[in-house]
Image (spheres, helix red, strand yellow):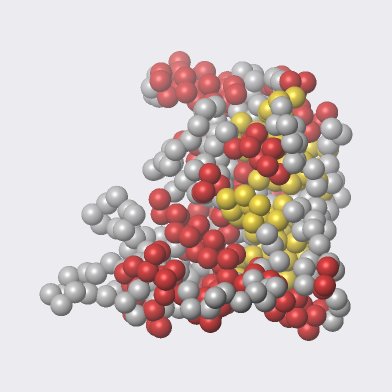
Amino acid sequence: MKQTTGLDRRDAIRLLSAGAALLRWGTAVPGVSAVTVQSPFVTSDVARLRRVIMCPPGPDMFAPSSTGDDVLPMPVSVGQAMLDEHEELMRAIHLSGADILTIPDLLSSAIAAARSRGTWETWLRGTHPKLAADPKIVTAQTLLGRDPATQYRTWPDGSYRHVVDSINSFMFSRDTAVTLPGGVVLLNVGSAQRVREQVLLRFIFDWAPQLARYPVLFDARQEGLLAEGGDFQLVDEHTLFLGVGNRTDPRIAPILARRLQMDVLAVQTRKVESLRPMGKRLGLRSAFLHLDSYFTHVADKQALTLPWFLEAAQAGKDPYTQFLKGMAADGSVSDDDLKAAREFMKDFGLVRLFRAGSADEDTSVSEMKLVDFVRSRGYTVHFVGGEPPTTDPIQHLFTTVLPEHEQQGANVVATSPGHVIAYEGATQTHIALRRAGIRVTTFSGRELWPRDGGPHCLTMPLERG
Protein backbone atom coordinates (compact mmCIF):
# COMPACT_ATOMS: atom_id res chain seq x y z
CA MET A 1 0.00 0.00 0.00
CA LYS A 2 1.38 3.38 -1.02
CA GLN A 3 2.01 5.71 1.89
CA THR A 4 0.87 9.30 1.62
CA THR A 5 3.62 11.59 2.80
CA GLY A 6 2.46 14.89 1.30
CA LEU A 7 5.66 15.14 -0.74
CA ASP A 8 6.11 13.67 -4.20
CA ARG A 9 9.51 13.29 -5.84
CA ARG A 10 9.59 16.80 -7.29
CA ASP A 11 8.47 18.33 -3.97
CA ALA A 12 11.35 16.58 -2.24
CA ILE A 13 13.79 17.81 -4.87
CA ARG A 14 12.44 21.35 -4.52
CA LEU A 15 13.16 21.18 -0.81
CA LEU A 16 16.73 20.14 -1.51
CA SER A 17 17.10 22.83 -4.15
CA ALA A 18 15.70 25.50 -1.86
CA GLY A 19 18.04 24.40 0.92
CA ALA A 20 20.98 24.73 -1.44
CA ALA A 21 19.80 28.20 -2.42
CA LEU A 22 19.59 29.24 1.22
CA LEU A 23 23.16 28.11 1.81
CA ARG A 24 24.44 29.73 -1.37
CA TRP A 25 22.70 33.09 -1.30
CA GLY A 26 21.97 33.40 2.42
CA THR A 27 18.40 34.57 1.81
CA ALA A 28 15.03 32.91 1.82
CA VAL A 29 13.68 31.71 -1.48
CA PRO A 30 10.40 33.56 -2.12
CA GLY A 31 7.19 31.58 -2.34
CA VAL A 32 4.92 29.41 -0.27
CA SER A 33 6.77 27.46 2.43
CA ALA A 34 10.12 28.74 1.09
CA VAL A 35 10.59 25.89 -1.39
CA THR A 36 9.79 27.59 -4.70
CA VAL A 37 11.02 30.61 -6.64
CA GLN A 38 8.22 32.89 -7.76
CA SER A 39 7.78 33.53 -11.44
CA PRO A 40 8.42 35.39 -13.62
CA PHE A 41 11.65 33.54 -14.13
CA VAL A 42 12.51 35.62 -17.21
CA THR A 43 11.04 39.06 -17.84
CA SER A 44 12.65 39.87 -21.20
CA ASP A 45 15.50 38.90 -23.50
CA VAL A 46 17.56 41.85 -22.24
CA ALA A 47 16.73 41.85 -18.51
CA ARG A 48 19.72 41.27 -16.23
CA LEU A 49 20.97 37.72 -16.71
CA ARG A 50 20.99 35.91 -13.36
CA ARG A 51 21.13 32.19 -14.15
CA VAL A 52 21.99 30.38 -17.37
CA ILE A 53 22.64 26.89 -18.71
CA MET A 54 25.70 26.39 -20.91
CA CYS A 55 27.39 23.33 -22.35
CA PRO A 56 31.18 23.49 -22.79
CA PRO A 57 32.21 21.48 -25.87
CA GLY A 58 33.99 18.19 -25.30
CA PRO A 59 37.61 17.47 -26.24
CA ASP A 60 38.72 16.60 -29.74
CA MET A 61 37.98 12.87 -29.95
CA PHE A 62 36.76 12.53 -33.57
CA ALA A 63 33.86 10.41 -32.31
CA PRO A 64 31.84 8.95 -35.22
CA SER A 65 28.07 9.28 -35.39
CA SER A 66 25.55 6.71 -36.62
CA THR A 67 23.31 9.50 -37.89
CA GLY A 68 25.72 10.46 -40.66
CA ASP A 69 24.99 9.54 -44.27
CA ASP A 70 28.53 8.89 -45.52
CA VAL A 71 30.62 5.72 -45.50
CA LEU A 72 33.50 7.87 -44.27
CA PRO A 73 32.18 9.69 -41.19
CA MET A 74 33.83 13.04 -40.71
CA PRO A 75 32.69 14.25 -37.31
CA VAL A 76 33.24 17.82 -36.26
CA SER A 77 36.67 18.26 -34.73
CA VAL A 78 36.81 20.16 -31.46
CA GLY A 79 40.25 21.62 -30.90
CA GLN A 80 41.77 23.53 -28.02
CA ALA A 81 41.05 26.88 -29.68
CA MET A 82 37.32 26.20 -29.59
CA LEU A 83 37.48 25.08 -25.97
CA ASP A 84 39.33 28.30 -25.12
CA GLU A 85 36.80 30.48 -26.96
CA HIS A 86 33.86 28.90 -25.19
CA GLU A 87 35.65 29.26 -21.86
CA GLU A 88 36.18 32.95 -22.62
CA LEU A 89 32.45 33.36 -23.20
CA MET A 90 31.70 31.61 -19.91
CA ARG A 91 34.14 33.93 -18.16
CA ALA A 92 32.41 36.99 -19.61
CA ILE A 93 29.00 35.64 -18.57
CA HIS A 94 30.31 34.95 -15.07
CA LEU A 95 31.84 38.44 -14.78
CA SER A 96 28.45 39.90 -15.68
CA GLY A 97 27.16 38.41 -12.42
CA ALA A 98 25.25 35.40 -13.76
CA ASP A 99 25.25 31.95 -12.18
CA ILE A 100 26.26 29.30 -14.75
CA LEU A 101 24.98 25.73 -14.68
CA THR A 102 26.62 23.33 -17.14
CA ILE A 103 24.98 20.43 -18.95
CA PRO A 104 27.63 17.89 -17.77
CA ASP A 105 27.10 18.91 -14.12
CA LEU A 106 23.31 18.89 -14.43
CA LEU A 107 23.43 15.51 -16.10
CA SER A 108 25.61 14.11 -13.32
CA SER A 109 23.16 15.42 -10.72
CA ALA A 110 20.21 13.94 -12.60
CA ILE A 111 21.92 10.53 -12.81
CA ALA A 112 22.62 10.56 -9.08
CA ALA A 113 19.02 11.50 -8.29
CA ALA A 114 17.58 8.82 -10.58
CA ARG A 115 19.91 6.22 -9.07
CA SER A 116 18.83 7.15 -5.56
CA ARG A 117 15.19 6.60 -6.53
CA GLY A 118 15.86 3.31 -8.31
CA THR A 119 14.73 4.49 -11.76
CA TRP A 120 18.13 4.96 -13.41
CA GLU A 121 18.39 1.51 -14.97
CA THR A 122 14.83 1.66 -16.30
CA TRP A 123 15.45 5.03 -17.96
CA LEU A 124 18.75 3.86 -19.42
CA ARG A 125 17.21 0.70 -20.90
CA GLY A 126 14.48 2.75 -22.52
CA THR A 127 16.68 5.45 -24.00
CA HIS A 128 20.18 3.95 -24.42
CA PRO A 129 19.81 0.17 -24.56
CA LYS A 130 23.39 -0.34 -25.75
CA LEU A 131 24.61 1.19 -22.49
CA ALA A 132 22.15 -0.62 -20.21
CA ALA A 133 24.20 -3.80 -19.73
CA ASP A 134 26.42 -2.07 -17.18
CA PRO A 135 24.57 1.00 -15.85
CA LYS A 136 26.99 1.50 -12.96
CA ILE A 137 29.76 2.71 -15.23
CA VAL A 138 27.61 5.09 -17.28
CA THR A 139 28.38 8.73 -16.49
CA ALA A 140 27.42 12.11 -17.88
CA GLN A 141 30.51 11.95 -20.12
CA THR A 142 29.33 8.58 -21.44
CA LEU A 143 25.90 9.95 -22.37
CA LEU A 144 27.48 12.99 -24.03
CA GLY A 145 29.69 10.76 -26.17
CA ARG A 146 32.88 11.97 -24.50
CA ASP A 147 34.12 8.72 -22.99
CA PRO A 148 36.79 7.08 -25.22
CA ALA A 149 36.31 3.71 -23.52
CA THR A 150 32.71 3.69 -24.72
CA GLN A 151 33.18 5.38 -28.06
CA TYR A 152 35.71 2.94 -29.47
CA ARG A 153 34.53 -0.49 -28.44
CA THR A 154 34.94 -3.47 -30.76
CA TRP A 155 33.29 -6.85 -31.21
CA PRO A 156 35.34 -10.05 -30.60
CA ASP A 157 36.20 -10.18 -34.31
CA GLY A 158 37.74 -6.70 -34.08
CA SER A 159 35.00 -4.86 -35.94
CA TYR A 160 33.79 -1.51 -34.64
CA ARG A 161 30.87 -1.57 -32.22
CA HIS A 162 28.95 1.70 -32.23
CA VAL A 163 27.45 2.44 -28.82
CA VAL A 164 26.57 6.13 -28.55
CA ASP A 165 26.84 9.24 -30.71
CA SER A 166 28.88 12.25 -29.69
CA ILE A 167 26.72 15.37 -29.36
CA ASN A 168 29.03 18.36 -29.19
CA SER A 169 26.24 20.39 -30.85
CA PHE A 170 24.80 20.54 -27.32
CA MET A 171 27.05 23.56 -26.81
CA PHE A 172 24.31 25.51 -28.65
CA SER A 173 22.23 25.04 -25.54
CA ARG A 174 19.50 27.55 -26.40
CA ASP A 175 18.12 25.37 -29.19
CA THR A 176 16.81 22.68 -26.84
CA ALA A 177 14.79 24.80 -24.38
CA VAL A 178 13.76 28.34 -23.50
CA THR A 179 12.58 29.77 -20.20
CA LEU A 180 9.64 32.15 -20.24
CA PRO A 181 7.98 34.04 -17.37
CA GLY A 182 6.07 31.00 -16.07
CA GLY A 183 8.52 28.20 -16.77
CA VAL A 184 10.28 26.18 -19.43
CA VAL A 185 9.37 25.29 -23.00
CA LEU A 186 11.14 22.13 -24.15
CA LEU A 187 11.80 22.18 -27.87
CA ASN A 188 12.19 19.73 -30.75
CA VAL A 189 15.23 20.10 -33.01
CA GLY A 190 14.93 19.19 -36.67
CA SER A 191 18.36 17.61 -37.08
CA ALA A 192 18.58 13.83 -36.64
CA GLN A 193 22.04 14.29 -35.14
CA ARG A 194 20.59 16.42 -32.33
CA VAL A 195 17.50 14.42 -31.35
CA ARG A 196 19.28 12.81 -28.40
CA GLU A 197 19.88 16.24 -26.89
CA GLN A 198 16.13 16.44 -26.30
CA VAL A 199 16.15 13.07 -24.57
CA LEU A 200 18.95 14.13 -22.22
CA LEU A 201 17.43 17.54 -21.57
CA ARG A 202 14.06 16.06 -20.61
CA PHE A 203 15.92 13.71 -18.23
CA ILE A 204 17.78 16.67 -16.72
CA PHE A 205 14.61 18.69 -16.13
CA ASP A 206 12.90 15.64 -14.66
CA TRP A 207 15.70 14.76 -12.23
CA ALA A 208 18.38 17.43 -11.66
CA PRO A 209 17.72 19.06 -8.25
CA GLN A 210 19.05 22.39 -9.53
CA LEU A 211 16.15 22.59 -12.02
CA ALA A 212 13.28 21.31 -9.91
CA ARG A 213 11.85 24.79 -9.42
CA TYR A 214 11.27 25.38 -13.14
CA PRO A 215 7.99 23.84 -14.33
CA VAL A 216 7.74 22.55 -17.89
CA LEU A 217 4.95 24.51 -19.59
CA PHE A 218 5.10 22.98 -23.05
CA ASP A 219 6.96 20.17 -24.80
CA ALA A 220 7.22 20.62 -28.57
CA ARG A 221 8.43 17.06 -29.04
CA GLN A 222 5.32 15.69 -27.38
CA GLU A 223 3.24 17.91 -29.67
CA GLY A 224 5.10 16.62 -32.73
CA LEU A 225 6.11 20.10 -33.89
CA LEU A 226 9.63 21.21 -34.72
CA ALA A 227 10.86 24.22 -32.77
CA GLU A 228 14.32 25.51 -31.85
CA GLY A 229 15.34 28.03 -29.22
CA GLY A 230 17.21 30.35 -31.56
CA ASP A 231 13.80 31.35 -32.90
CA PHE A 232 12.44 32.47 -29.49
CA GLN A 233 12.88 35.99 -28.08
CA LEU A 234 10.94 37.28 -25.09
CA VAL A 235 10.07 40.95 -25.46
CA ASP A 236 8.30 41.29 -22.11
CA GLU A 237 6.18 39.16 -19.81
CA HIS A 238 3.30 39.23 -22.28
CA THR A 239 4.97 39.17 -25.71
CA LEU A 240 7.05 36.59 -27.56
CA PHE A 241 8.79 36.99 -30.93
CA LEU A 242 9.05 33.68 -32.79
CA GLY A 243 10.94 32.98 -36.01
CA VAL A 244 9.07 30.43 -38.14
CA GLY A 245 9.37 28.54 -41.41
CA ASN A 246 13.00 27.45 -41.36
CA ARG A 247 13.70 25.59 -38.12
CA THR A 248 10.44 26.22 -36.26
CA ASP A 249 7.05 25.05 -37.53
CA PRO A 250 4.71 28.01 -38.18
CA ARG A 251 1.78 26.01 -36.76
CA ILE A 252 3.25 26.33 -33.27
CA ALA A 253 2.76 30.12 -33.06
CA PRO A 254 -1.03 30.18 -32.41
CA ILE A 255 -0.71 27.11 -30.17
CA LEU A 256 1.79 28.92 -27.96
CA ALA A 257 -0.39 32.06 -27.89
CA ARG A 258 -3.23 29.94 -26.58
CA ARG A 259 -1.28 27.70 -24.18
CA LEU A 260 1.06 30.32 -22.75
CA GLN A 261 -1.46 33.19 -22.66
CA MET A 262 1.00 35.41 -24.51
CA ASP A 263 0.92 37.52 -27.65
CA VAL A 264 3.09 35.70 -30.20
CA LEU A 265 4.56 37.58 -33.15
CA ALA A 266 5.46 35.00 -35.81
CA VAL A 267 8.32 36.27 -37.99
CA GLN A 268 8.50 34.46 -41.30
CA THR A 269 11.97 33.28 -42.21
CA ARG A 270 10.72 31.01 -44.97
CA LYS A 271 7.19 30.66 -46.35
CA VAL A 272 5.89 27.15 -45.58
CA GLU A 273 2.72 25.70 -44.11
CA SER A 274 4.52 23.10 -41.97
CA LEU A 275 7.98 21.65 -41.32
CA ARG A 276 9.43 18.18 -41.20
CA PRO A 277 12.90 17.01 -40.11
CA MET A 278 15.37 17.90 -42.81
CA GLY A 279 18.81 16.79 -43.84
CA LYS A 280 21.44 19.09 -45.27
CA ARG A 281 20.94 22.85 -45.03
CA LEU A 282 21.43 24.85 -48.21
CA GLY A 283 21.79 28.45 -49.30
CA LEU A 284 19.59 31.08 -47.72
CA ARG A 285 18.09 28.59 -45.28
CA SER A 286 21.54 28.23 -43.73
CA ALA A 287 22.36 31.94 -43.84
CA PHE A 288 19.17 32.79 -41.93
CA LEU A 289 19.00 29.74 -39.71
CA HIS A 290 17.06 31.20 -36.76
CA LEU A 291 15.53 34.52 -35.78
CA ASP A 292 18.64 35.26 -33.71
CA SER A 293 20.74 34.84 -36.85
CA TYR A 294 19.38 38.13 -38.13
CA PHE A 295 17.60 39.87 -35.22
CA THR A 296 18.34 40.19 -31.49
CA HIS A 297 17.39 42.59 -28.73
CA VAL A 298 20.22 44.69 -27.29
CA ALA A 299 18.27 46.93 -24.88
CA ASP A 300 14.66 47.80 -24.05
CA LYS A 301 13.01 48.58 -27.38
CA GLN A 302 16.34 48.45 -29.18
CA ALA A 303 17.21 45.75 -31.69
CA LEU A 304 20.13 44.72 -33.90
CA THR A 305 19.23 43.38 -37.32
CA LEU A 306 20.07 43.34 -41.03
CA PRO A 307 19.46 46.39 -43.19
CA TRP A 308 16.91 46.42 -46.07
CA PHE A 309 15.64 42.82 -45.82
CA LEU A 310 13.06 43.31 -43.06
CA GLU A 311 11.28 46.41 -44.37
CA ALA A 312 8.26 46.02 -46.65
CA ALA A 313 9.11 49.15 -48.65
CA GLN A 314 12.47 47.59 -49.59
CA ALA A 315 11.03 44.29 -50.89
CA GLY A 316 12.19 43.81 -54.47
CA LYS A 317 14.39 46.91 -54.26
CA ASP A 318 16.98 45.73 -51.74
CA PRO A 319 20.58 45.36 -52.99
CA TYR A 320 20.52 41.57 -52.76
CA THR A 321 17.51 41.35 -55.08
CA GLN A 322 19.24 43.77 -57.42
CA PHE A 323 22.25 41.48 -57.35
CA LEU A 324 20.04 38.50 -58.19
CA LYS A 325 18.63 40.34 -61.20
CA GLY A 326 22.15 40.87 -62.46
CA MET A 327 22.99 37.21 -61.92
CA ALA A 328 19.95 36.25 -63.96
CA ALA A 329 21.27 38.28 -66.89
CA ASP A 330 24.73 36.75 -66.46
CA GLY A 331 23.31 33.23 -66.77
CA SER A 332 25.65 31.44 -64.33
CA VAL A 333 22.90 30.50 -61.84
CA SER A 334 19.85 28.42 -62.75
CA ASP A 335 16.55 30.22 -63.30
CA ASP A 336 14.85 28.02 -60.69
CA ASP A 337 17.43 28.87 -58.01
CA LEU A 338 17.23 32.57 -58.80
CA LYS A 339 13.44 32.53 -58.67
CA ALA A 340 13.47 30.70 -55.33
CA ALA A 341 15.94 33.21 -53.87
CA ARG A 342 13.88 36.20 -55.02
CA GLU A 343 10.70 34.67 -53.59
CA PHE A 344 12.51 34.01 -50.31
CA MET A 345 13.63 37.63 -50.03
CA LYS A 346 10.22 39.03 -50.98
CA ASP A 347 8.49 37.26 -48.08
CA PHE A 348 11.41 37.23 -45.64
CA GLY A 349 10.50 38.92 -42.35
CA LEU A 350 6.73 39.22 -42.81
CA VAL A 351 4.93 39.09 -39.45
CA ARG A 352 1.69 37.63 -38.09
CA LEU A 353 0.46 38.52 -34.61
CA PHE A 354 -1.52 35.94 -32.61
CA ARG A 355 -3.26 37.29 -29.54
CA ALA A 356 -2.87 35.80 -26.07
CA GLY A 357 -5.43 33.21 -25.05
CA SER A 358 -7.68 33.28 -28.11
CA ALA A 359 -4.84 32.93 -30.64
CA ASP A 360 -6.90 35.17 -32.95
CA GLU A 361 -4.78 36.81 -35.62
CA ASP A 362 -4.46 40.59 -35.41
CA THR A 363 -4.83 41.68 -39.03
CA SER A 364 -3.71 45.24 -38.28
CA VAL A 365 -0.10 44.16 -38.82
CA SER A 366 -0.73 42.36 -42.12
CA GLU A 367 1.87 43.10 -44.80
CA MET A 368 4.30 44.44 -42.20
CA LYS A 369 7.83 43.14 -41.98
CA LEU A 370 9.69 42.85 -38.70
CA VAL A 371 11.52 46.20 -38.77
CA ASP A 372 8.28 47.97 -39.74
CA PHE A 373 6.53 46.31 -36.80
CA VAL A 374 9.11 47.14 -34.14
CA ARG A 375 9.45 50.73 -35.35
CA SER A 376 5.67 51.08 -35.05
CA ARG A 377 6.16 50.04 -31.39
CA GLY A 378 8.76 52.75 -30.75
CA TYR A 379 11.94 50.70 -31.27
CA THR A 380 15.35 52.04 -32.20
CA VAL A 381 16.86 49.77 -34.85
CA HIS A 382 20.62 49.21 -35.25
CA PHE A 383 22.03 47.50 -38.33
CA VAL A 384 24.69 44.90 -38.96
CA GLY A 385 27.47 46.79 -40.75
CA GLY A 386 26.27 50.12 -39.38
CA GLU A 387 23.82 52.53 -40.99
CA PRO A 388 23.59 51.65 -44.69
CA PRO A 389 24.87 54.29 -47.12
CA THR A 390 22.58 56.11 -49.52
CA THR A 391 24.88 55.24 -52.43
CA ASP A 392 26.57 51.98 -53.52
CA PRO A 393 24.36 49.66 -51.44
CA ILE A 394 25.50 46.54 -53.30
CA GLN A 395 29.11 47.30 -52.41
CA HIS A 396 28.13 47.84 -48.76
CA LEU A 397 26.18 44.56 -48.79
CA PHE A 398 29.10 42.47 -50.05
CA THR A 399 32.01 44.23 -48.39
CA THR A 400 30.50 44.88 -44.95
CA VAL A 401 27.03 43.50 -44.22
CA LEU A 402 27.37 39.92 -45.45
CA PRO A 403 30.90 39.38 -44.04
CA GLU A 404 29.79 40.65 -40.63
CA HIS A 405 26.55 38.67 -40.85
CA GLU A 406 28.55 35.52 -41.64
CA GLN A 407 30.51 36.11 -38.42
CA GLN A 408 27.19 36.18 -36.50
CA GLY A 409 27.11 39.96 -36.33
CA ALA A 410 23.48 40.05 -35.17
CA ASN A 411 23.77 37.00 -32.91
CA VAL A 412 24.61 38.71 -29.62
CA VAL A 413 23.46 37.99 -26.08
CA ALA A 414 22.45 40.71 -23.64
CA THR A 415 23.54 40.35 -20.01
CA SER A 416 21.60 43.49 -19.03
CA PRO A 417 19.79 46.25 -20.92
CA GLY A 418 22.38 47.94 -23.12
CA HIS A 419 25.22 45.46 -22.52
CA VAL A 420 25.82 42.66 -25.03
CA ILE A 421 28.46 39.99 -25.56
CA ALA A 422 29.51 39.39 -29.18
CA TYR A 423 32.12 37.67 -31.28
CA GLU A 424 35.03 39.78 -32.46
CA GLY A 425 35.05 40.57 -36.16
CA ALA A 426 31.82 42.50 -36.81
CA THR A 427 33.76 45.76 -36.43
CA GLN A 428 31.40 48.21 -38.12
CA THR A 429 28.44 46.72 -36.28
CA HIS A 430 30.15 47.17 -32.92
CA ILE A 431 31.23 50.72 -33.74
CA ALA A 432 27.61 51.62 -34.55
CA LEU A 433 26.31 50.02 -31.34
CA ARG A 434 28.88 51.77 -29.17
CA ARG A 435 28.10 55.14 -30.77
CA ALA A 436 24.46 54.50 -29.82
CA GLY A 437 25.45 53.92 -26.18
CA ILE A 438 25.38 50.12 -26.20
CA ARG A 439 28.24 48.48 -24.30
CA VAL A 440 29.76 45.66 -26.37
CA THR A 441 32.06 43.03 -24.85
CA THR A 442 33.78 40.94 -27.52
CA PHE A 443 35.75 37.71 -27.54
CA SER A 444 37.35 35.61 -30.24
CA GLY A 445 34.89 33.25 -31.93
CA ARG A 446 36.94 32.22 -34.96
CA GLU A 447 36.37 28.51 -34.29
CA LEU A 448 32.77 28.95 -33.16
CA TRP A 449 31.05 31.23 -35.67
CA PRO A 450 31.56 28.94 -38.72
CA ARG A 451 29.30 26.41 -36.95
CA ASP A 452 26.30 28.69 -37.53
CA GLY A 453 25.86 29.95 -33.98
CA GLY A 454 26.69 32.95 -31.86
CA PRO A 455 26.68 33.94 -28.18
CA HIS A 456 22.86 34.03 -28.16
CA CYS A 457 22.80 30.39 -29.32
CA LEU A 458 25.41 29.31 -26.75
CA THR A 459 23.34 30.39 -23.74
CA MET A 460 20.06 29.11 -22.28
CA PRO A 461 18.89 31.70 -19.73
CA LEU A 462 16.94 30.34 -16.76
CA GLU A 463 16.46 33.58 -14.85
CA ARG A 464 16.45 37.20 -16.02
CA GLY A 465 15.15 40.26 -14.28
Residue at point 62%, 62% (across, down): 444
- Front residue (pair 230, 31): 31
In the figure, 396 relative to 199: above or below? above
Label total for image: 0
Residue 179 can be seen in this image: yes
Residue at point 65%, 30% (across, down): 349
- Front residue (pair 337, 444): 337
Splitting the image into 4 quarters, where does residue 257 fall?
Answer: top right
Residue 425 can be seen in this image: no
Q: Is residue 229 left or right of residue 390?
A: left
Query: Please, which residue is most extreme toward the left here?
Result: 157
Query: Please, which residue is most extreme toward the top here?
Result: 329
Residue 280 image position (x, y, % from top left) = 39, 43
Q: Is residue 155 left or right of residue 444?
A: left
Residue 207 image position (x, y, % from top left) = 58, 70
Residue at point 82%, 72% (across, down): 33
